[in-house]
Image (cartoon, rainbow, N blue to C red):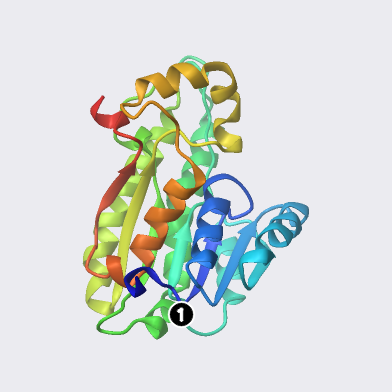
């Protein structure tokens, strides 16, 4: 099963201290990644996640705020040498009735969900290019959402940001593919995370019943798709938006 091994590869996962980011970081380490760097705004959360992940391999935590271009540049400056895998996972959401939806919610959500993946990817292009080979490209994995495919209510900036990220993924895939860098997106459905916690507490059973496979996502479901896209098995996948949702978008 060497097709799915990540031996010798270095990775950076933003928002890697909890939820989907933590699931992905763990999966990359378990698949043999040489080193995984996780980032998050809160230093305490970074330290706790590093302690949890250390049992699986070499992990480093870097407190960073990637909601601004300057923050993206600062995080990129800490990365030394080739970077084989970049996972743009850090994100935010906001929900409010249309009459009450504030302009600040558009700025906050689009800055983190849509602009930061572009700025961070751009800042790390030298590292990604250094890792790329003709047979094994460097990988950028953007974490979108089924909300960028479906039409959820009252999360106006979130759904727009994720739909935009899916399209940005396609544009970057076309531009960076010739440079030995593939760019793909994952569109998760319902998974256990801090962002989804309140919703799942209130409506978890109903949400699970709406999914054709009758459950919500598990950590291995998200780890699996990230390992696939990062490994030799996914080397010829570029510009894809992959729903990991148990079939929710076709329900």
The residue at the point 52 percent across, 35 percent down is: 93
Residue 69 visible (yes or no) = no
Figure check: 85 above or below 19: below
Which of 7/135 is in front? 7
Q: In this image, 55 relative to 8: left or right? A: right
- Residue at 40 percent across and 35 percent down: it is 189
Quarter of the rendering containing residue 85: bottom left
Q: Is residue 235 left or right of residue 33?
A: left
In the picture, residue 228 is in which quadrant? bottom left
To which quarter of the image does residue 104 belong? top right
Which quadrant does the C terminus fall into?
top left
The residue lying toward the viewer, choosing from 15 and 236, is 236
Q: Where is residue 127 in the image (x, y as percent from the top left)?
A: 46, 80
Task: Give above or below for 249 relative to 117.
Answer: above
Q: Position of residue 237 (x, y in %)?
A: 24, 63
Query: Looking at the image, which residue sits at the far front?
Result: 1
For the N terminus, the image quarter is: bottom left
Q: Which residue is drawn at 46% across and 54% down?
A: 223
Q: How crowded is mark 1: few (under 14 residues within 10 Å), some or many (20 or more)?
A: many
Q: Does residue 86 appear anywhere in the picture?
A: yes
For this view, does 242 lie left or right of residue 88? left
Q: Which residue is found at the position 58% from the left and 53% from the top? A: 22
Mark 1 secondary-structure assignment: helix
Q: Is residue 206 above or below residue 108?
A: above
For label 1, the residue is 127
Of residue 67 and residue 3, the one placed in the foreground of this image is 3
The percent position of residue 88, horizontal first and vertical second, equals 47, 57
Q: Where is residue 103 in the image (x, y as percent from the top left)?
A: 51, 31
């Amino acid at each position: 099963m060497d097709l799915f091994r990540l031996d010798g590869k270095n990775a950076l996962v933003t928002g890697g201290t909890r939820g989907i980011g933590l699931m992905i970081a763990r999966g990359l380490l378990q698949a043999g990644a040489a080193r995984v760097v996780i980032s998050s705004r809160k230093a305490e959360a970074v330290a706790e996640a590093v302690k949890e992940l250390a049992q699986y391999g070499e992990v480093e935590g870097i407190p960073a705020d990637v909601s601004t271009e300057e923050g993206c540049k600062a995080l990129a400056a800490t990365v030394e040498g080739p970077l084989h895998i970049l996972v743009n996972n850090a994100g935010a959401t906001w929900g409010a009735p249309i009459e009450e939806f504030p302009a600040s919610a558009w700025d906050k959500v689009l800055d983190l969900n849509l602009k930061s993946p572009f700025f961070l990817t751009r800042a790390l292009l030298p590292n990604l290019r250094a890792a790329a080979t003709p047979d094994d490209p460097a990988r950028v994995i953007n974490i979108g959402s089924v909300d960028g495919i479906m039409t959820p209510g009252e999360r106006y900036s979130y759904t727009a940001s994720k739909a935009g990220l899916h399209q940005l993924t396609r544009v970057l895939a076309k531009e960076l593919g010739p440079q030995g860098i593939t760019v793909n997106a994952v569109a998760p459905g319902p998974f256990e995370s801090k962002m989804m916690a309140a919703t799942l507490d209130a409506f978890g059973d109903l949400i699970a019943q709406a999914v054709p496979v009758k459950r919500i996502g598990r950590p291995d479901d998200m780890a699996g798709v990230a390992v696939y896209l990062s490994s030799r098995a996914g080397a010829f996948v570029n510009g894809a938006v992959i729903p990991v949702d148990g079939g929710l978008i076709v329900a």
